[in-house]
Image (tube, rainbow, N blue to C red):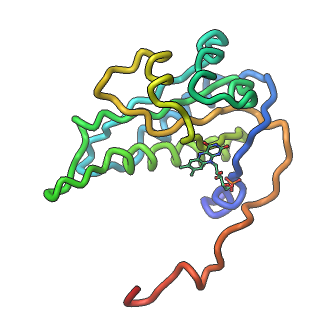
Amino acid sequence: MSVFDLIKRRRSIRKYKETIVEQEKLNAVLEAARLAPSADNKQPWVFIVVTDPHVKKLLRSSYEEEWFIKAPVIIVGCAAPKEAWSRIDGEEYWKVDVAIAMQNLVLAATELGLGTCWIADFDEKAAKEVLRIPEDVRVVAMTPLGYQDQEKGLVTRRKPFNTIVRHDKW
Ligand SMILES: Cc1cc2nc3c(=O)[nH]c(=O)nc-3n(C[C@H](O)[C@H](O)[C@H](O)COP(=O)(O)O)c2cc1C
C-alpha cells in the first residue's frame, strides 16, 4: 500500500479480536519504530511489548477502558529524556522523537492489517509502577496492537485543507 493509502486507512481501533499477532508482524512494526528519525539521531526510546495477560490486567490501573486490554499486545512507548537532544534554549524533543517512532509503528501495523489506537490519557505513575519503569524515564504513549473487530472507513473529521495551510506568513 502507498504511504498515502496507509495514512487514509489508519483509524483508531477500540475493538480487537483475541487472535494472536504473529511474531514476524510484531517484529516488523517494532523495526519500523527503530528506523524512525530522531533529533541528533539520539534514539532516546524504549518500547515495552506487553503480552502477559496478568501484566495487561494490571495496566488497567493506568487506563481503565476495557477494550484497551482486550488486544493481544500493548506497546508502551517510553523516552529517556537524559539521552535525548535539547535545543540550546532548553526546549526538549524526546516527546517528538518517540511520537515519530510510534507513528512509524502505527503505519507499519496498518500495512500489515493490524489495528492500533494512540493512547495518551493514561496515569503515567500507575503505568510506570506496573511496568517497573525507572524514575527518569517517561511514558509518552501507548497503543494496543491486534486484529481489529470493527469496520472503520477512511480517515474523516479533519479540518479543511485551506484552514490549516498558510502561505509565506501566519
Ligand atoms: C497523541 C494522541 C493521543 C490520543 N489519546 C487517546 C486516548 O487516550 N484514548 C483514545 O481512545 N484515543 C486517543 N487518541 C485517538 C484520537 O482520539 C483519534 O486519533 C482522533 O479522534 C481521530 O480519529 P482516528 O484516529 O480514527 O482518525 C489519541 C490520539 C493521539 C494522536
The single residue placed furthest to the left in the displayed view is 88
Location of residue 38 in the rendering, given as x and y in whole percent from the top left corner: 33, 49
Q: Quick one: quadrant of the C terminus?
A: bottom left
Could you tell whether 52 is left or right of 115 in the image? left
The single residue placed furthest to the bottom in the displayed view is 168
7 vs 70: above or below:
below
Could you tell whether 157 is left or right of 94 in the image? right
Compare residues 75 and 21 and report the one nearer the observer. 75
Location of residue 134 in the rendering, given as x and y in whole percent from the top left corner: 33, 20
Compare residues 129 and 4 and report the one nearer the observer. 129
Could you tell whether 138 is left or right of 9 in the image? left
Location of residue 131 in the rendering, given as x and y in whole percent from the top left corner: 47, 17
Residue 42, quarter of the rendered image: top left
- State the residue at coordinates (67%, 46%): 110
- State the residue at coordinates (75%, 30%): 67
- State the residue at coordinates (66%, 46%): 111
104 vs 30: above or below:
below
Location of residue 130 in the rendering, given as x and y in whole percent from the top left corner: 50, 16
- State the residue at coordinates (21%, 50%): 86
Compare residues 52 and 91 and report the one nearer the observer. 91
Q: Quick one: quadrant of the N terminus?
A: bottom right
Residue 153, quarter of the rendered image: bottom right
